[in-house]
Image (tube, grey):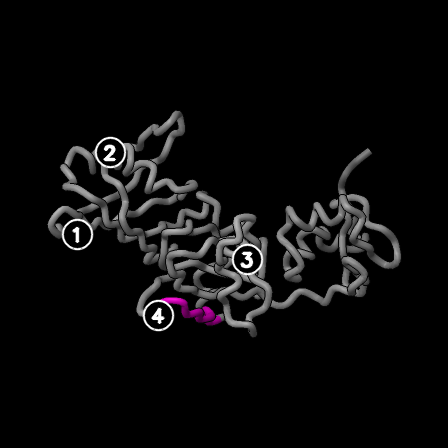
C-alpha cells in the first residue's frame, strides 16, 4: 500500500478552504467553519470535510450562491489611522479598518494587525494564503516602527530589549531599538522586530516603565509606509510583488 499518486492520475487541485480563502469568501479558518455548518456544496453535493479538492470546472456554492474563480493575488498598502480595530466585525461596535476602505476594493484581509490606538502601514490582500505566509516569523521580514514613549530611555533598557524579555510569563524575542530624539518628557525610538506578537511593543515597554504614547508602523518587510496619506490605500504593482515574493504565482 502506498500514498503515492500515479503519474497518470488527475491533479488533486486545491483544498476547498484555501480555494474559498483565495476567492475572497472567508479566511481559511472561517471557510472550515462554513463547511462544518453545512453551508458549502460542490457539484451539487454537500462538502462535509475540508480535505476536499477543487479542480477547474468544479462548481462551488456557499450559502446558495455560486463562488467565482479566485482572482489573481493582489496586495495593497494602507495607512491605518488610530481609532480603528483591525477586524471585519467588532462585537463592541467600534469602527473597523474594513468599514473605512474604499467601496470599490474587493474583499480583503489584513497581513497581521495593528491595535486600536496604533497607526501606520497595514498590508491588505485578497489571498488568505499570502496573508499567512507573510505573517510567519520564518519569512524573516522585519516590522519597523516609530515609537514614542514617556520618559527617558537609558542604554541598559535598550540592551534588555536586544536580549529578549519575558513579560508575564511570555517570552519575547530580541527587539532592536535606538533613540531618535528626546522631546521634553518623551522619547522617540526606532524599533524593529521580526515576530510581532499581540501588543508586543506596548507590553515590553510597559515592563521597562516606558509607557507607549504613540506607535506608528513604517515598514513591513520591503514594503514602506512612505508618503502614503493617512487613510489612503495604494495597490502594490504586480511586478514589485513578484520581485519581493518570488514564490508567488501571479
Residue for badge 1 = 180
Q: Residue furthest front?
A: 93
The image shows residue 127, relative to residue 29, as above or below, that is: below
Q: Residues within 10 Å of mark 3 (few under 14, many from 20)?
A: many
Q: Residue at x 73, y 49 (%)?
A: 34
Q: Which mark is residue 172?
A: none
Residue for badge 2 = 208
In terms of depth relative to the viewer, which is nearer, 3 or 134?
134
Kindly check if marks 1 and 4 are in contact, taking CB atoms under 8 A apart as contact.
no
Dominant SS of magenta comes to loop
Quadrant, the N terminus: top right
Distance between mark 2 and mark 1 Cα atoms: 18 Å
The image shows residue 150, relative to residue 125, as above or below, that is: above
Q: Residue at x 81, y 52 (%)?
A: 9
State which quadrant residue 83 falls in.
bottom left
- The reply to whether the magenta stretch includes residue 89 is no
Distance between mark 2 and mark 3 Cα atoms: 33 Å
- Locate residue 232, reporting x and y percent: 41, 70
- Extent of the magenta region: 228-237
Q: Residues within 10 Å of mark 2 (few under 14, many from 20)?
A: some
Which-is-in-front pick, marks 2 and 3?
2
Which-is-in-front pick, marks 2 and 1?
2
Disc tally is 4
In terms of depth relative to the viewer, which is nearer, 223 or 239?
223
In screen coordinates, is 163 left or right of 198? left
Residue for badge 4 = 229
Q: Which mark is residue 109?
A: 3
Q: Earlier in the sequence, mark 4 or mark 3?
A: 3
Distance between mark 1 and mark 3 Cα atoms: 33 Å
Q: Earlier in the sequence, mark 2 or mark 3?
A: 3
Amino acid at each position: 500500500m502506498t500514498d503515492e499518486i500515479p503519474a497518470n492520475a488527475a491533479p488533486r487541485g486545491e483544498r476547498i478552504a484555501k480555494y474559498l480563502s483565495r476567492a475572497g469568501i472567508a479566511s481559511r479558518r472561517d471557510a472550515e467553519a462554513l463547511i462544518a455548518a453545512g453551508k458549502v456544496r460542490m457539484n451539487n453535493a454537500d462538502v462535509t470535510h475540508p480535505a476536499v479538492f477543487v479542480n477547474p470546472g468544479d462548481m462551488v456554492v456557499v450559502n446558495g450562491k455560486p463562488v467565482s474563480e479566485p482572482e489573481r493575488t493582489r496586495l495593497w498598502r494602507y495607512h491605518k489611522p488610530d481609532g480603528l480595530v483591525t477586524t471585519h466585525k467588532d462585537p463592541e461596535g467600534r469602527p473597523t479598518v474594513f468599514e473605512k476602505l474604499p467601496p470599490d476594493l474587493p474583499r480583503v484581509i489584513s497581513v497581521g494587525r495593528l491595535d486600536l490606538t496604533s497607526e501606520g502601514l497595514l498590508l491588505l490582500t485578497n489571498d488568505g494564503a499570502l496573508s499567512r505566509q507573510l505573517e510567519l516569523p520564518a519569512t524573516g521580514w522585519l516590522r519597523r516602527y516609530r515609537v514614542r514613549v514617556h520618559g527617558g530611555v537609558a542604554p541598559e533598557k535598550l540592551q534588555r530589549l536586544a536580549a529578549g524579555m519575558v513579560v508575564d510569563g511570555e517570552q519575547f524575542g530580541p527587539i532592536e531599538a535606538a533613540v531618535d530624539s528626546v522631546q521634553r518628557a518623551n522619547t522617540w525610538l526606532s524599533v524593529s522586530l521580526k515576530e510581532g506578537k499581540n501588543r508586543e511593543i506596548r507590553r515590553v515597554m510597559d515592563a521597562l516603565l516606558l509607557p507607549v504614547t504613540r506607535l506608528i508602523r513604517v515598514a513591513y518587510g520591503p514594503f514602506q509606509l512612505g508618503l502614503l496619506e493617512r487613510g489612503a490605500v495604494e495597490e502594490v504593482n504586480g511586478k514589485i510583488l513578484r520581485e519581493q515574493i518570488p514564490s508567488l504565482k501571479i
